[in-house]
Image: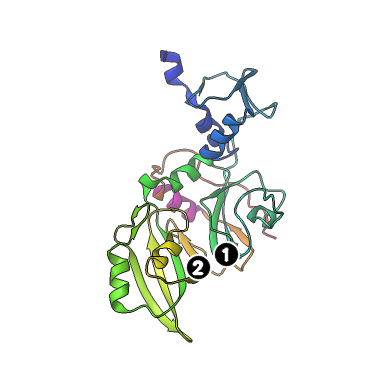
Amino acid sequence: MTATEATGTRLQKWLAEAGLCSRREGEVWIRDGRVAINGTLITEQGVRVQPGDVVAVDGQPVQRGRLERLLLALNKPPGVICTRHDPEGRQTVFDLLDPNLPRLVTVGRLDYLSEGMILLTNDGLLAHRLMHPRQAVERVYRVRVHGRVSPALLAQIQNGVELEDGPTGPLAATLDHHAGGANSWLTLTLREGRNHLVRRIFAAFSMEVSRLIRIAYGGVTMGELPLGRWRLLDAQESLRLRKAAGFRPNLPGAPSGRKPRPR
């Protein structure tokens, strides 16, 4: 690698900082041959963008001026997916947004049956940092399970659960109450985003999760936001998330700017 190559910005990071996608999505775009630098199609990871380079996606040059940073929360209903497009034609979280918003990416995902807080932003770098395991950003869930959770079982969950892809480590878990029949409501606080993690924790004890609601992410709560609606985060909430992502307060790019009217 030459000195010039080492000083540039990795292409997937450049795309994320331009607000076009997450880093992971950028890697897929590169692999699929959708991105070019100075007219040359790029299909290998690790290529760097130098000052003055012209980057194009799907043949369209990317204009990187001052990007209006947006950060919003959406209360995802069950039966809605978090991908941008679905081959089965199911409703996505993007269908619930104002079409006048700029292109946004989700900060992590919730599965098809789960509900609650989804963060969306056009700041790809912030999204990447919030999801990165190194940052250990808090996610808080309310969980209803079939079965009565005993104090002994709660202690086992709190001490960490061995799963097929490794232990969870100690968890913050509280038993809120026993609902009608043989159901229990709990609140869990996790600092990792492995797929279906909450459901797998209870499956390890032969218990089924019947409802899963994310109520907070990175210290920001969903509040009284109605199901299927969204709101822009205020300056304090945005600052809290940037701090959770490891950014110093004086770094540029804090989500701000105009506030599109929620539908």
Residue 13, percent from left and from top = 50, 32
Q: Residue at x 62, y 23 (%)?
A: 36
Quadrant assignment for the N terminus? top left
Q: Residues within 10 Å of mark 2 (few under 14, many from 20)?
A: many
Q: Secondary structure at mark 1?
A: loop
Q: Main secondary structure of the magenta part?
A: helix
Identify the residue under disc 1: 113
Q: Secondary structure at mark 2?
A: strand
| Vertical placement of residue 189 versus 210, above or below | above
Comparing 1 with 233, the one in front is 1
Residue 255, percent from left and from top = 53, 46
Q: Residue at x 67, y 55 (%)?
A: 97
Q: Residue at x 33, y 57 (%)?
A: 168
Q: Residue at x 41, y 46 (%)?
A: 245
Magenta segment, which residues?
A: 235-243
| Vertical placement of residue 29 versus 79, above or below | above
Q: Amino acid at mark 2?
A: Leu
